[in-house]
Image (cartoon, helix red, strand yellow):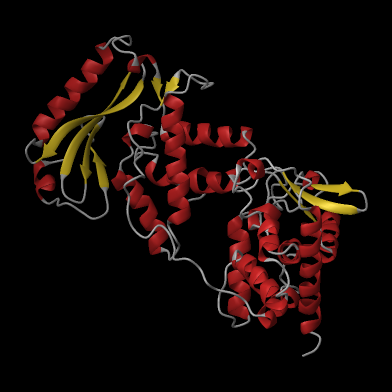
Amino acid sequence: MTDRWLQTLKPAATRQEFADALIPGLRLRIGARTLSWSALVRGPKGRKRIGLGKYPAIGLKEARILANEAAENMRTESPTNSDAESHAVGSVRDLFSFVIQQMKSEGIASVGEYEGYLVKRSNSALNVIGIDEDGSDRAANEITPDDVTTWLRIFHDAGSQTGHPRAYLSAAFSRGLSADYDPTNPNPDVRFNLTANPVTHVGGKMKGQPRHRTLTLEELSGFWHGFSGRGVSPSMKLVFRLLISMGGVRITEILYSRKDWFQQRADETWLCLPRTKNDRAHDLPLTEFGLAAYQAALQISDPASPYLFPKHHNPDEPQTLNSISQSTRKWCDRNKVERFQPRDLRRTIKTLLIERNPQLNRDWIDVWHNHGQAADVARKHYDRAEYVSVKQAVAEAIDALVQDVETQHSQK
């Protein structure tokens, strides 16, 4: 760094950071409004960033002196000065690793989605905002709303929604905050020293508008028959067929389904969901078409995987939501059909069932979709075997609908 070079710098929309070649650890960060000095110093309890002030109020010469003083103070500082310093300060990498392991231990099926956005992708949060330019890990408590905005802007500029990555990052920092003050935390020697969630106040269009796309019977039939052939994964075809033939249950309840969720009861096979979106178990009898799709999926599924639809390159994980969304978009574009999302199948099935079966009680469909069952205390703890006859009646109506979907194409 030189004084002449510093005079050419101005605030920038994209955050930048430069390191001084003369004084190790001295950094100049260029933000949207200011240029600020900081020093990265290492002490008995790990690496820490110390703010030194803003440029040009503090010039290069004074910043170098302050950086040297900060490094010296850290070297001589006692590690027992405070309770906060008695713990190693967790990095962003530590935070994400802790969160992912915690989710895996809780059996959360969507952990693969979190791991992708937080760690594994080339544009993951770890790679974009968790590592300094010199390759060192940043402390989790260094991450600011500006950092979060920088990361989310990558998805926005690529034409992708920012809602999911924002939610995953926010959940990670929320878990970190809880872990700092959790007496059951299995790793008490590491503290993230978070005082706030940096994602909370990041704005923008994070939530899409309520969706209203409903497929016609002809479109649904075209999708049922057309999602096959060359270049189409057989397992992905069966994901969609099982979604449709099970009356539009939630996507994750099929995509993340484990083989042991399918249980035999007398002469019926049931999909027994141990935990759903509303934190309750939910059991459904397989429809005739659903049973056929399940048996076909079981035949081609990796026998060593616990999942009915495992990843091809990693059978220990289920297929991702991103894969099923991409497949749907490609089919729509290839067949010149107005785009829809896989979750629109749920609304479509419910709408078609109501239109075609005026005598079918709407509450029964809500029972099938696991809605409206918590109106009172008794129903919050309802027997899993309750509503068997109701569910069987809905299953028959779904089979009748899918039969029409099956024959619609051949009548053209």
Dividing the picture into quadrants, the one containing residue 75 is top left
Q: Looking at the image, can residue 126 be seen? A: no
- Asked if 46 appears above or below 368 in the picture, the reply is above
- Asked if 179 appears above or below 11 in the picture, the reply is above
Dividing the picture into quadrants, the one containing residue 249 is bottom right
User: Quick one: 218 or 57, which is closer to the camera?
Assistant: 218
Q: Residue 178 at x, y = what percent?
A: 44, 29
- Asked if 82 appears above or below 197 in the picture, the reply is above
Residue at 44% x, 32% y is 176
- Quarter containing the N terminus: top left
Callout count? 0
Q: From the viewer's perspective, tell me whether residue 2 is left or right of residue 196.
A: left
Residue at 69% x, 44% y is 281
Q: Residue 256 at x, y = what percent?
A: 68, 50
User: Quick one: 233 or 373, which is closer to the camera?
Assistant: 373
User: Quick one: 19 or 295, which is closer to the camera?
Assistant: 295
Q: What residue occupies the far right of the structure in this picture? A: 267
Q: Residue 213 at x, y = what percent?
A: 55, 73
- Quarter containing the C terminus: bottom right
